[in-house]
Image (cartoon, coloured by chain):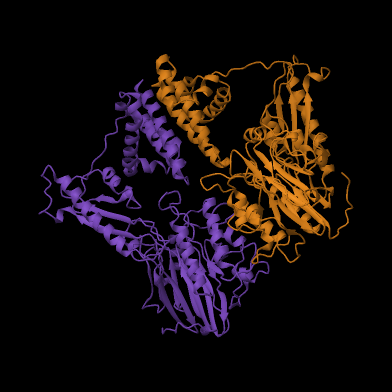
Chain colours: A purple, B orange
Amino acid sequence: MSTVNSQDDEDTFKILVATDIHLGYLEKDPVRGNDTFVTFNEILDHAQKNEVDFVLLGGDLFHENKPSRKTVHSCLESLRKYCMGDRPVQFEILSDQAVNFHYSKFPWVNYQDENLNISIPVFSIHGNHDDPTGADALCALDILSCAGLVNHFGRSTSVEKIAISPILLRKGRTKIALYGLGSIPDERLYRMFVNKQVTMLRPKEDEDSWFNLFVIHQNRSKHGATNYIPEQFLDDFIDLVVWGHEHECKITPFQNEQQRFYISQPGSSVVTSLSPGEAVKKHIGLLHVKGKKMKMEKIALETVRTFHIEDVVLADHPDLFNPDNPNVTQAIQAFCMEKVELMLDNAERERLGNPHQPEKPIIRLRVDYAGGFEPFSIYRFSQKYMHRVANPKDIIHFFRHRGQKEKKDIDLNFGKLVSRPTEAMTLRVEDLVKQYFQTAEKKVQLSLLTERGMGEAVQEFVDKEEKDAIEELVKFQLEKTQRFLKERRTEAEEEKIDEEVIFFLQLICALCKE
Amino acid sequence: MSTVNSQDDEDTFKILVATDIHLGYLEKDPVRGNDTFVTFNEILDHAQKNEVDFVLLGGDLFHENKPSRKTVHSCLESLRKYCMGDRPVQFEILSDQAVNFHYSKFPWVNYQDENLNISIPVFSIHGNHDDPTGADALCALDILSCAGLVNHFGRSTSVEKIAISPILLRKGRTKIALYGLGSIPDERLYRMFVNKQVTMLRPKEDEDSWFNLFVIHQNRSKHGATNYIPEQFLDDFIDLVVWGHEHECKITPFQNEQQRFYISQPGSSVVTSLSPGEAVKKHIGLLHVKGKKMKMEKIALETVRTFHIEDVVLADHPDLFNPDNPNVTQAIQAFCMEKVELMLDNAERERLGNPHQPEKPIIRLRVDYAGGFEPFSIYRFSQKYMHRVANPKDIIHFFRHRGQKEKKDIDLNFGKLVSRPTEAMTLRVEDLVKQYFQTAEKKVQLSLLTERGMGEAVQEFVDKEEKDAIEELVKFQLEKTQRFLKERRTEAEEEKIDEEVIFFLQLICALCKE
C-alpha cells in the first residue's frame, strides 16, 4: 500500500482517528479529575485546526456505562463547541442512512439535519465501557446522537449473526466504505467468527474501487484461547483496521502479512492503568485517504499527563541489599526515593509546555522484593510525594516475581476483636475486614458458593455441623452483600457502605462473643 | 385586569405554560412507565400546533434529580422533534443574556444560536426534584441547555441574597419582563423574604409598560409556619405569577386581592400521589399577552391516565355493616368491589378517545374502618383488578379517621425465628422485618439516636447493660443501613437490598440463638 501526499485536495478525505478517550475516568480525583475532558478538547481542537472531514472514534468515549451528569454535560459542551459551525462538510453519503443508523431516533447523519449546523461530523462505535445496556438497550452515545452531536454506528442487535453494512462515503473521486462493529464480548464474537456468522456486506458496484475502513473495539492481544479476536478472522478485502480497546499507542499502520490489510491501534488518550503499555507516548491520527491510498499522520497529544514507570529487582543488587541486614528496609526505601527523584526529573524534562498539560506526573515504581526482603510502609512513602505526583497513593507497587511467593494466610479470629475497647475497634476491624476480603477472594469454597442458591449453601454449612459454620456463613454473606452494594457506586458511596458494613460486622462479633 | 382577544397578531405573545411534568416518574412500572413521556409529547405537540412563541415550564420537568439515561434520551428526542424547525421566532430579547444565563456554558438564548434551528424556545426554571446538586452544581436541565434545547433561567447561586434579573422580551408593541426563581428550600427562601433579601430588578425605562410575569416553584399551601411562601411576599408590581410545585390544577388565574396580581397554578401533568388534588382534571395553559392585557386559555390534556378517588366511611353505614357480625369483612369487601366497579365505569366514560391515552385508570378507594372493623386482605383484592387498573397494589387504602387509633405494638421476638425451618424462614422474616421497620419509625429513642455519633449510642447501650441491648442495636443499625442503602435506588435495586438485608438478619438471629 502506497502513501498519498498530505496536501489537501478535493479528492482527499482527512479523518481524525482517536479511541478510548474514557471521559470521566477518575473524575472525582481532585488532581486527575479533569484530565479526560482537557484531552478531549485537545483532540477536537486538532480536528478543527486540521479541518478534517470527520472524526472517527473507536469506542469507550465514556469510562462509565452510565456517565455522570458532569461528564455528559462536559462532553456535550465540547462537541457543541468544536463540531458545530459554518464550515461546510465536503463529503456525501451514498448508503441508505436508515440502515446505517437504524436504531437511532433520528436515523440520518447529523450534518444533513436541517436544524443542526454541523461542521465536523463525529462517527463512533461504542466500546465495552459504554456499550448498550438495560431494557431499553441504550448507551451513553445515544444521548449524544439524540442531541445530534454524534453519529453512533456499528451497532448489531443480534447475538448470533452479524451483517455489517458499511456507511458509504464519497469525496470527489475517493470512496470510503466505513465498517464499524461496536464492542461485543470477545468470546461471543470469537464464536460467531468461527461459525461464519459475521458477514461484511460490500457495495454492489465497483467493489474494488472502495477504500475499506473497519473500526472495531475488541481484545487484540490474546486473553485466553477465545477471549480475543485474531486478526486473521477479519476479511482480507479490508484496507485499514482501526483497532480500539487496546490502550497502548501503536497508531502507525502495521501490515498483517497474511491478510494484507493494515492495522492502526491509536491507543487510549488517558492513562487508566499503571502498566508499561500506557507509558508509551499518546497519539491520535490524521488519516488521509485518496483513492485507494492512505497516509496516517501521527499527532502527539500535548495535554496527556506524563506517566513514568520503572522496575526494580532487589535481588539483582546483592551489593546494595542484604536481607539479613537489620537496616535493609531503610536502604531499600532510600534507593526507591532516589529512583523516584530521577523519574520526576525525566517527567519534568518531558513536559511539552502546553499550558493545558497538567503539572504533576504519574509515577510508578515496581519493586520486586523476592529473596527475603520486606516491603516498607507505602503510606509514609506516599506522604512525601503528595504534592509532587498525581498518584501518591500508588507510586510504589511491591511484587514478588522471583521464585514462589510464600503463602501467608491471615488469621481471621473475630473473637479477638470484641476484647478490644470500642473506640479502637473500628479501625482494627476495618483492617481485618479488608484483609479478610483479600484472603477470601482466593478461597475456592467461597467463590463456588456464589454459583449456587443460598438455601443450598446454608444447608451445606449446617450439615457440616462445624463449630464456626454460621460465623463463616455470616462472613460469606457479608462479602456477597458488600460486593453487590458496590456495583456501580461512586467512591464516596463505597466508603460509606464500607463504614456501614464494618460497623455491622462489629455488632455481629459482639453477638458471637455472647 | 382585562382580557385580550385570542386572535393572533404581531403584538400578542402566545406562551404555552406547563409545570411538574415529572419525566421518568414510575418509569420502570410496566403499565405506567411511559405515561410522562407520552404527555410531554402531547404538551409539545400543543405548543407546535398553536404556534406559540415559547414554552414556559415551572420546574420538575424531571422526576429524579439524576434522571435515567432513558429519560434524558426520551426528553432530548421530544425536544429535538417538536422544538426545532424553520418557523421563525417572532420575539426579541432586550436584556443582557450573559446575565440571564450566566451559569450556562452557552450564555445566550438557544434560538439565537447560529448553529441551532429552534422554532419553539423552551424557558424553564428548575424544581425541587431537578435542582442543582453536587460539587459542580449542575442540574438535569443543564444537560438540555448544553445540548441547546432548553433555556434554563432563574437560577440563584447565593444562599443569603437573591436579586432576580428578568429576561426582557419584546414582540411588536408588547413587552414582557420574565422573572424566574428556581426551587429553593422553602424555609430558607421564607427567611430571605422576611429579611428583605429577595429583590426583583426592574427595567429602568418605562417601568410600567412591561407585563411582569414571574415563575416560581415553591410550596404555596402552608406546611408549617415558615415552610411555604405566602403570596403576599411577592412584589405587587407583578402581573401574573405562574406557580409550580403544587400538583392540583388551578390554572385559571386567580387574583390575590391584597397584592392585586393574578396567580395561575397549572398543576402537574401526571398523577404522582393518590390524593384528591391529583384527581382534578389536568390542564396546561395557552397564555396570551398583549400590552398589559392577558388571557389564559385552558387546554385539557388528553393523554393523562384517568384517576378516580373516593372515600368510604364504614361507620356511616350502620345499616350495612355491623362489626359484631362474623361475616362483616366479606360484606365490606363486596361493598368495596361494587364501588370500584362504579369507579371503573366512570373512568371508562371519561376517557377521551385520544389514541395515546393509556387504557387502565388509576383507582383509589379510601376506606375509613374506624369503629371496630378489620381491614380485609388487600392482596387478594388487588389480584382481582390486576388487568383492569393501573395501580392494582394500592387500590384500597385503609385508614382510621374516627376516634383514636388503637396502638398495636408488634411483638418483635427474633428468637422465635430461628426455631423455624430454613426454607420457610425467609418469608416470615421478611414480614417481621417490615413490621419492625413500621414500628421502629415511631420509636423516639431510636430516631433520637440518629442525631448522635454511633460511638455514643454504643456506649449508652452498653451502660444500660440490658440483656437485649446489643440485639436492639443490631436492629437499629440494620434500619439505618437499610435506609442509607435505599437512597436514590430503583425499585428492583431496593428489592435486592431488602433480600440481602433480610438474609443478613436471619444469620444474626441464628447467632443470637447460639
Q: Position of residue B64 (x, y in %)?
A: 61, 44
- Asked if residue B4 can be seen in this view, the reply is yes
Tell me where residue A509 sits by quadrant.
Answer: top left
Tell me where residue A415 sits by quadrant.
Answer: top left
Q: Position of residue A475 (x, y in %)?
A: 37, 34
In the foreground, B295 or A319: B295
- Asked if residue B41 can be seen in this view, the reply is no
Going by the image, does B301 lie left or right of A372?
right
Vertical placement of residue A197 versus B70, above or below: below
Q: How many marks?
A: 0
Pick the quarter of the image with the N terminus of chain B: top right
Pick the quarter of the image with the C terminus of chain B: top left
Q: Position of residue B325 (x, y in %)?
A: 76, 16
Vertical placement of residue B92 versus B60, above or below: below
Tell me what residue is drawn at x 62 percent, y 60 percent: A146
Tell me what residue is drawn at x 33 percent, y 28 percent: A424
Going by the image, does B256 lie left or right of A384?
right
Tell me what residue is drawn at x 58 percent, y 40 percent: B491
Going by the image, does A325 lie left or right of B200?
left
In the foreground, B62 or B258: B258
Vertical placement of residue B479 versus A212, above or below: above
Q: Position of residue B178 (x, y in %)?
A: 73, 49
